[in-house]
Amino acid sequence: MSLQTLEATHPPVLPAAAPSPAIELENVTRRFLTPDGKSMTALHDFTMTVDRGEFACVVGPTGCGKSTTLNLVTGLAKPSAGEVRVMGGAVTGIHKDVGFVFQADALFPWRSVLDNVAAGPIYRGMPKAQAYEKARDWIARVGLARFEKHYPHQLSGGMRKRVALAQTFINEPKILLMDEPFSALDVQTRTLMQDELLSLWSGSGASVVFVTHDLEEAVALADKVYVLTAGPATVKSVYHIDLPRPRVMEEIRYDAAFVEKCRVIWNDLREEVQIGQQRTLKTGH
Ligand SMILES: Nc1ncnc2c1ncn2[C@@H]1O[C@H](COP(=O)(O)OP(=O)(O)OP(=O)(O)O)[C@@H](O)[C@H]1O
């Protein structure tokens, strides 16, 4: 076979198409009916893109619409206008690749730590022996190997949160939605859990949307911080956080670049917090 023929049999090499972002909200508006039957706009013309493997944090005044953004990604809330896509496809329900960690524990109180962590893979059809082996591995990764047989009420708040992380990461989510997951913890435990999360996330390739009231937490964790306006929420600004990784929570708060980023973003966020507070004083909600 001549070289010419060989060349002719090969299809032209095209550049690989870039994968779609993990999450896209495009010009989304979400309205709710209030108890007295009026229409209330929670999100307005809201656009957000989270790339694969990216860690995005969402901050904004109380009640502005942060949790609603997560509900749109899960499909629990449908957009009144605009589009929501997960892994390039329209949202039709909870996507199999999505995992959650919320402020309240989602642990079964009547199940041991081991049974809680193994429950997800078993539910998804994994043979029991394999699920338990995997659960033991994840429990060890979050430092709870000695507590496999304990029940949730026998654990501290931080330990329960570790179980919740193991319970989520064991399903190898490609997207992780977190709604103030550490806000009920004391400051020291919270710092430890933030480190734990970054360590688990760094090996996972997952895209994260993390909602928090705590701007320092957002800047310390994120690749990108979305600042929302006082409701109806729209994106006021997006900040790219280029602080080097791996980040260590106890150290980063003394880093001059970190402090400066927090200062700049707080100036932006403060205006919205003040608008939200004034509105609450006027209307009572
Ligand atoms: N299912 C619903 N029905 C009616 N109104 C809703 C519903 N869900 C949310 N809302 C309203 O939408 C607005 C935004 O709520 P959301 O929970 O998204 O805000 P948030 O920023 O997460 O709040 P917080 O800071 O208190 O956690 C609020 O005024 C809330 O009352």
Image (tube, rainbow, N blue to C red):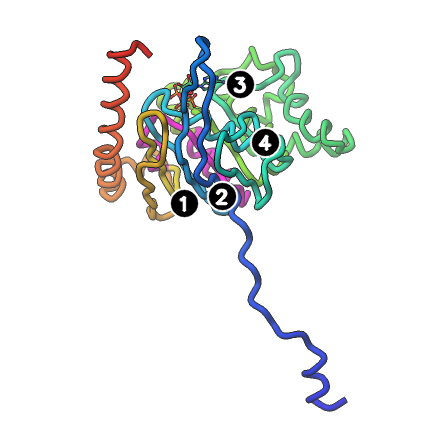
Q: Which residue in the structure is indicated by mark 1?
A: 246
Question: In whole angstroms, how far apart are the C-alphas of marks 3 and 1?
Answer: 27 Å
Question: In whole angstroms, how far apart are the C-alphas of marks 4 and 3?
Answer: 19 Å
Question: In whole angstroms, how far apart are the C-alphas of marks 2 and 4?
Answer: 17 Å
Q: Which residue in the structure is indicated by mark 3?
A: 105
Q: How many marks?
A: 4
**Region of the chain picked out in magenta, as a range:** 193-220
Question: In whole angstroms, how far apart are the C-alphas of marks 2 and 3?
Answer: 23 Å
Q: Amino acid at mark 3?
A: Asp
Q: Amino acid at mark 2?
A: Ser
Q: Is residue 92 left or right of residue 49?
A: right
Q: Amino acid at mark 1?
A: Pro
In the picture, the quarter occupied by the C terminus is top left
Which of discs 3 and 1 lies nearer the camera? The answer is: 3
Q: Is residue 211 left or right of residue 23?
A: left
Q: Quadrant of ligand 1?
A: top left
Marks 2 and 4, the one that precedes in the sequence: 4
Q: Which residue in the structure is indicated by mark 4?
A: 140
**Neighbour tally class for label 4: few under 14, some 14-19, many 20 plus, Cα within 10 Å:** some
Callout 2–callout 3 Cβ contact below 8 Å: no
Callout 1–callout 2 Cβ contact below 8 Å: yes
